[in-house]
Image (spheres, rainbow, N blue to C red):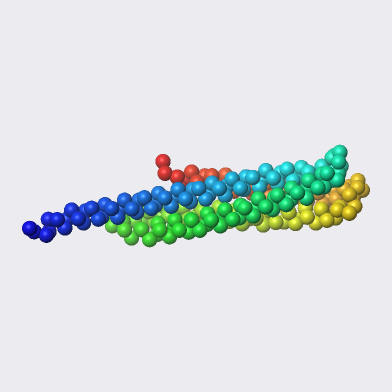
Amino acid sequence: MNHRYWIIPFLVLTLAGSLAFTQSEGLERIKILTKRAEDTVKKIEDTEKQLQGTLNIYNSIVDSTTTDARKAYRDLVKAVERCESLADEARQNNALMEQEAHNHFAEWTNNLKSISSDNLRQRSQERLNETRLQYGEILRSGRSARGEFDTFIDALRDQIVYVGYDLNTTAAESLQKDAVKVNEQANVLLKIIDELVLSSKEYIKSIQPN
């Protein structure tokens, strides 16, 4: 029996198996990355909602519109702690997303050399570069949001300490100028978060298989 005749189907089956594995692995990577990204976005949205509620409590104290300043103060302390807890969870989810994105891009890069067509390899490289650029912009927006978040929370914590032993109308009124700045910071932060969520959802949609 001529060995050449059974080597050919063996090579075809091996190549097909290798290709199927690569495709399956790539789809699984995208699935995991999508899940990590969706989890991160959900935590960011939860944090944004908590931030808005925290700001409302804060303003009710400064504006003296609350009917129970002591309760509002305790609620504010808890709300700030909840904000920080949610932000920490968002950071943890983001770290997992970044690791999965690194794996995804590394495998994509590694598998480019398996494309024999120069034209297709170049086009795949261009799509990889575009995806990396889009993902990089999301990361930069996330870092900007974290910086603004820390500034906002620090300002709130300072004022919590300020009125902690002097919780009366005069003390609250003395914070009104500071409150203007805090609300401006909050508006900037909430806008950045809105843009981050929107761009993240667009990215998730762009990487999902049809």
* In front of the other: 174 or 18: 18
Give 163 or 135, whichever is nearer the viewer: 163
Q: Looking at this view, is 145 or 72 the one in front?
A: 72
Query: Taking 160 as reference, is 126 left or right?
Result: left
Q: Nearest the camera: 119 or 102? A: 102
Q: Residue 182: horizontal and vertical position, in percent?
A: 77, 50
Can the viewer see residue 194 in this picture? no
Quadrant (top left/top right/bottom left/bottom right) for the C terminus: top left
* Screen quadrant of the N terminus: bottom left
Is residue 160 shown to the viewer in this render? Answer: yes
Locate residue 49 relative to residue 22 in the image: left or right. right
- Residue 82: image x %, image y %? 70, 49
Q: Residue at x 54, y 44 (%)?
A: 201
How many marks do you count on the picture? 0
Picture coordinates of residue 144 (x, y %)? 63, 55
The image position of residue 45, as x and y in percent, is: 62, 45
Name the residue at 78% across, 55% down: 157
